[in-house]
Image (spheres, rainbow, N blue to C red):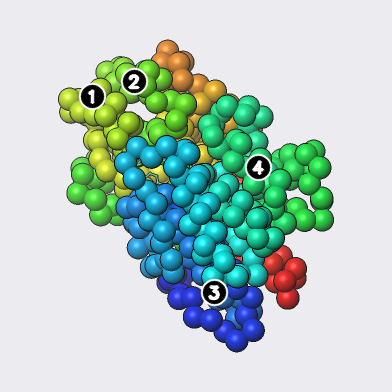
Amino acid sequence: MGMMAMGMSSEKNEGAKVIDVIIGTRPEAIKMAPVIQELRSRDEFSARIIATGQHSDMLKQVLDFFSFSADVNLGVMKREQSLDYITSSVLLGVGEILDSDRPDAVLVHGDTTTTFSAALAAFYRRIPIGHVEAGLRSNDITRPFPEEMNRIATDRISSWWFAPTESARDNLIREGIPAGGVHVTGNTVVDALQWTRNIAKTPSEPCMSDLAGGPPFILMTAHRRESWGEPLAGICGALLEILRRHNSYRALVPMHRNPVVRNTMRRILSENPNVILCDPLSYPDFVWALNNCVLILSDSGGVQEEATALSKPVLILRDVTERPEAVERGSGILVGLDAERIINAACKLLGDRAAYAAIVDRCSGNPFGDGRSSARIADVLSAAMG
Ligand code: UD1
Ligand code: UDP
């Protein structure tokens, strides 16, 4: 994908195969944007964007950046929505769309409840499913929750599996998925990141203005369900302790919109003058922050991949990860949710230049892809559906 603007519309070519690309949350939009762009650049496809609206503003923020608008938006999100609610409303809503669209295929991404429910709606109608970012496994059905179940169930009912890495491919083969349908494509997040990196030269968000050319900073995000409550409070407390021991550092903490997460973060972090607590950043601003920070603390899946792609050390705030490549490379350090471990790992890196440099030096290449994943996915679909 070159540097041309994204945002081509879904105008239909005569005889083109109709593909409904179903997205619901921020990471699905970021990682599917390059795929939509690639499909729309080929006359043989007509790619429609079906948004479930599991996320409202966080999804729109991404679509706006990439200049896409949803062809359909089910707008299911409500405050503190339950898993039952998302599962059932996406199943019913996407089912109705598929009944009227009758697409030749659907594409879903990753492991959210949108992914699983939308795939189920397609499966019930015998519409073939392409699963982008297939085969990731933490091998603990409770972590991340409910994502590990979502991706296993989605893989079970898909027809094409776009595995980002060899290890994701191996996971699928081990589970009996037919090898002929599994394609190692790289992760489309690298396509999105490469495209955005060239645009993200300076931050546009006012709260970040002091950071450009200013003090070194730590970037932190956390939102996982299994961290809600005490573990998240512990993570925030650990950040304060790291800043106390390294008082020339700032921390940039873009808060997920989930009120459960925000309440905890605000309660613990809002008084500290060295913490910049802000709303979710636009993708280019967040990429700028990834690129310019010293250290990342995150429980996010996508951030582990992006940090690795940018050779940036990331302390992974989880007990297990489905992205072993980040850890194998040495720049991803699995610290879990224990405050003491988080503090020790961060202070070791911030206080020991040699240890820090050794990690960054070891990073070469990118295990998550080369920026051509979307083209590979479109090639596979072209051969299979043409
Ligand atoms: C969801 C996914 C998770 C993914 C994450 C990416 C599920 C079960 N979880 O988690 O896999 O890692 O998205 O961010 O699919 N909210 C807003 N505005 C928004 C978005 C969310 O106000 O734009 C608030 C709402 O109150 C909503 C709550 O956040 O009820 C939780 O959203 P939900 O999609 O249920 O869970 P996430 O934690 O975002
Ligand atoms: N991201 C963003 N703005 C932010 C925080 C994250 O654009 O303020 C991007 C980030 O670059 C990554 C994606 O959102 O591509 C990760 O989404 P999230 O952490 O919500 O979900 P996960 O990857 O854990 O499913």
Residue at screen point 41% across, 20% down? 231
Crowding near the residue tagged with mark 3, few <14, some 14–19, many ≥20 C-alpha atoms within 10 Å = many
Residue 49 appears in view: yes
SS for callout 2: helix
- The kind of residue on which mark 2 rests is Ala
Crowding near the residue tagged with mark 4, few <14, some 14–19, many ≥20 C-alpha atoms within 10 Å = some
Which residue is denoted by mark 2 in the rendering? 233
Circle number at residue 153: 4
- The kind of residue on which mark 1 rests is Arg
Which residue is denoted by mark 3 in the rendering? 40
Q: Is residue 198 left or right of residue 280?
A: right
Spatial separation of the CA atoms under disc 4 and disc 2 = 32 Å
| Mark earlier in primary sequence (3, 1) | 3
Residue at screen point 62% across, 29% down? 141
Q: Position of residue 340 (x, y in %)?
A: 42, 13
Crowding near the residue tagged with mark 1, few <14, some 14–19, many ≥20 C-alpha atoms within 10 Å = few
Q: Is residue 139 left or right of residue 256?
A: right
Q: Quarter for ligand 2?
A: top left
Q: Circles 1 and 2: CB distance less than 8 Å?
A: yes
Crowding near the residue tagged with mark 2, few <14, some 14–19, many ≥20 C-alpha atoms within 10 Å = many
- The kind of residue on which mark 3 rests is Arg
Q: Quadrant of residue 320?
A: top right
Q: Nearer the viewer, mark 4 or mark 2?
A: 4
Spatial separation of the CA atoms under disc 1 and disc 2 = 9 Å
| Mark earlier in primary sequence (3, 2) | 3
Q: Circles 3 and 1: CB distance less than 8 Å?
A: no
| Mark earlier in primary sequence (1, 2) | 2
